[in-house]
Image (tube, rainbow, N blue to C red):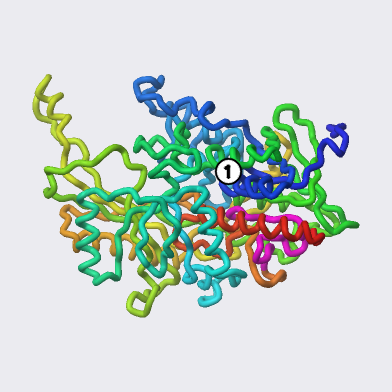
Amino acid sequence: MNLNLRATPENTYDAIVIGSGISGGWAAKELTEKGLKTLVLERGRMVEHVTDYPTATLNPWQLPHRNSLTPADRQASPIQSKVYNFHEASKHFYVRDVDHPYNQVKRFDWIRGYHVGGRSILWGKQSYRWSDLDFEANAKDGYGTDWPIRYADIAPWYSYAEKFAGISGSKENIPVLPDGDFLPPMEMNVLEKHIAKRVEAHYKGGRRIIIGRVAHLTVPHNGRGACQFRNRCERGCPFGAYFSSNSATLPAAKATGNLTIRPYSIVHSIIYDEQKQRATGVKIIDTETMQTYDYYAKIIFCNASTLGSASILLNSTSNRFPNGLGNDSGQLGHNLMDHHYGVGAYGDTDDFQEFYTYGNRPNGIYIPRFRNVNDSEKRDYLRGFGYQGGASRGRYDTDEGIGAEFKESLTEPGKWSFGVGSWGEHLPYYENKVTLNRDKKDKWGLPTLDIDCEFKDNERKMRVDMANDAAEMLEAAGLKNIGTYDASPAPGFCIHEMGTARMGRDPKTSVLNGFNQIHACKNVFVSDGACMASNGVVNPSLTYMALTARAADYAVAELKKGNL
């Protein structure tokens, strides 16, 4: 038996944060800046900004396999290796699937990175606000439970998060996509500008193409450098030009003197004291020694990711909570969602041959939702979708010539092409769920997850429009050789998983209240993707940042009042 022999005072903090990804980093920053001695528990290794980005400046010829994956890489990570930015120079920021098993009742591609910073090193950086169209959807169409907040409740916190993180974008006055506090936007290229004008004119302003809103700095900001248009973000950015826990929130937390990070610490469970009717701490397993330790705090923020937080809460059982911490409603683990994507259209043009692009812009265009927004765009499915994409020039494609002449021809740019892919909303179905499999345990003795999740008829109906509407817009813009595609990836592969511990107004139908606080255990907060009651159409990370900052502000205020 492994015993924690350290004295309790050594292991006691004001607050504990489980996880160091986007939401965990924000929780750490906010709690430490408000004066709380805070312990961050991370199951993976330490990653220091700049010094632990070993491939950030390497060129392909400086890598053993020219940035390609080996058969051994694919064998060790059959799921992770499907991801667009998983390659030789970034694979160390992803888990090895063979080391972290889970069980797919239905196919679910669980993409993960276990290290300090988590997927904040790897994310796509697209950063959009929700609108009331998103927050009111559940109440209006009856799927899921009503959100306990509206846009007005979170708008100031969106601003707060944007101003610190540094979000570049343009103000467009689009009701379904509220404007934010932006740094200067990146610039669309010549074909993107042309298509944007043609589409807006054709649809009389009903469809808009704008530059993406991204957590890339276009000017120096908060001690971080501007984006260099290298587009090697998944390796870690030595300039700090995109937002990550490593470059932004954790350094801010460290600067307070109130931060302690403990890597190699898998959370076994949250400790609940039945007499005090509150959580008192967290039990961890040291991944290097296999020894267990208990850490204690007044406030606990669970930010281990949607599935990680669900796993921890489900494993945190007691006489009071036999089915998982705070699970009086029976909703814990249910309502799992992901955006469905991998569908869109493409085309090309012979025009604009005298123009080219600058650098490797790590951003594209965005087309906000237009379906089911008003009666004129009403369809036979619920909710909607948006598009991301962009224009580029590839290499001149020829197999003619030989020797120097052929080599020289390869330096000639080819046609301009333009493509868009769509992100669609996934309804919060109760039956899409995760449960603990206590018969199949990992190498640390913890139950593995059974994941049972699928897209249904509503999503399949939507995908027809996602492809056809894209092709229609490209045709209206005057492109040629237009085609559509639908790769139909499984849930999880969009890496926007959310739900499992949803917010709600009624403790009988939800796990968390409007401040991300567990209804039945007031000093535990969950502000990562697990908290989401629906998933909208835009990338979710900015919403996690805002919700976390808001929850931390509330938690500290309640602590000072003596309510926690």
Q: Residues within 10 Å of mark 1 (few under 14, many from 20)?
A: many
Q: Is residue 184 above or below residue 144?
A: above
Please tell me whether residue 471 belongs to the stretch shown in magenta.
no
In the rendered structure, which segment of residues is drawn in magenta? Answer: 510-529
The foreground one among 190 and 118 is 190
Q: Quadrant of residue 498?
A: bottom right
Q: Is residue 28 above or below residue 372?
A: above
Say what amino acid the circle numbered 1 marks: Thr
Which quadrant is the N terminus positioned in? top right
Residue 344 placement, left or right of 449 = left
Please tell me whether residue 513 belongs to the stretch shown in magenta.
yes
Is residue 173 in view?
A: yes
In the current view of this chain or complex, which residue is farthest to the right?
275
Q: What secondary structure is the stretch in magenta mostly built from?
A: loop
Q: Quadrant of residue 484?
A: bottom left
The structure residue drawn at horizontal position 64% and vertical position 43%, both measured from the top left corner, is 19
| Residue 290, percent from left and from top | 75, 30
Say which residue label 1 marks.
Answer: 249
The structure residue drawn at horizontal position 40% and vertical position 35%, both measured from the top left corner, is 232
| Residue 41, percent from left and from top | 69, 40
